[in-house]
Amino acid sequence: MRRIFSNKIVIVALIIVVLLILVIVSHNERSGVNSVSNIISIPAAPLQKAFSFVKEKVGDFFGYFEDSREIRAENAELRQRISELEQEVLNFDKLQKENKELRDALNFKDQYDEYDFIGCSIIAKDPGNWFNVFTINRGSKDDIEPDFPVVTAYGLVGRVSKTDLVSSKVVSIIDIESTVSARLSKSRDLIVIRGDVELRSKGLCRADYIPPNADIMPGDIVETSGIGGIYPKGIIIGKVVSVISNEGQYDSYAIIEPVVDFKRLEEVLVLKKEASGSLE
């Protein structure tokens, strides 16, 4: 029993000695403990670097996806804004066009102040690509009558051919039923503008009864002459595209391109003489 007790005392004493030695040498910069620490840390250094590298790349990987989400969101916002800006540009262009048409219409009205201008929308047209015969949304209840001139702010469209209570039929200058007394703006020579079966499919018409000595060439402007009792004088009809010269008096004719686009008509103006209502 004493032997066991004495052995325990020896063991405890040894432990105390070892602890004292460790405390002493831990303060010595040149001690073996630091050497042991260095021996352990040297093999661990590459592992620490590898761990740091992997950690950095994993962070970059997830950061890339985070950045991609932000970029996609920004791109979606930019595309939406571009779409809105494009629509604003279209609206602005449309307003500019409408504004110009209104200014031109006012200038046109100033030239023909003896007429009332009745604004009309086209509600129907004959089959085909061209507005050679069409229907407007004003009729006899609006005091519209057959043979009233029809125009746009740019020039001559045609004439009213038939009316009912709430609508009217219009025959344009490119239709084969149309004949307009006209003149060359430059030379003042009188001619006749009429529709042609072949030219109608191209949105064109022709000038007949050209005087043999008439000064006419491509680019010349053609306007109404005021003769005939339907169209007032000086409304622009179009311009000469080409002249076909034939032998014989009045055998030559010219191709006329109307100033009005008969493929994209939407609104027109009917001219009504104020005198018809001012004589009461």
Image (tube, grey):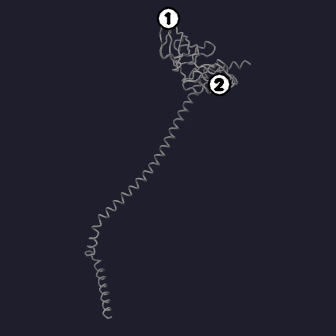
Image side of residue 250 versus residue 10, left or right = right
Q: Residue at x 42, y 50 (%)?
A: 68
Task: Please identify the residue farthest to the right as the structure is shown.
Answer: 280
Which label sits in the foreground, 2 or 1?
1
Above or below — where is 250 with respect to 172? Answer: above
What's the amino acid at mark 1? Answer: Gly
* Disc 1 element: loop
Q: Which residue is mark 2?
A: 118
What's the amino acid at mark 2? Answer: Ile
Task: Please identify the residue farthest to the top as the structure is shown.
Answer: 248
Q: Which residue is mark 1?
A: 248
Closer to us: 187 or 5 = 5
Q: Position of residue 136 (x, y in %)?
A: 63, 25
Name the quadrant of the N terminus: bottom left
The numbered dot on residue 53 is none
Name the quadrant of the C terminus: top right
Quadrant of residue 140 in the image? top right
* Disc 2 element: strand
Quadrant of residue 2 in the image? bottom left
Q: Position of residue 179 (x, y in %)?
A: 58, 14
N-terminal label among 2 and 1: 2
Q: Position of residue 98 (x, y in %)?
A: 57, 30
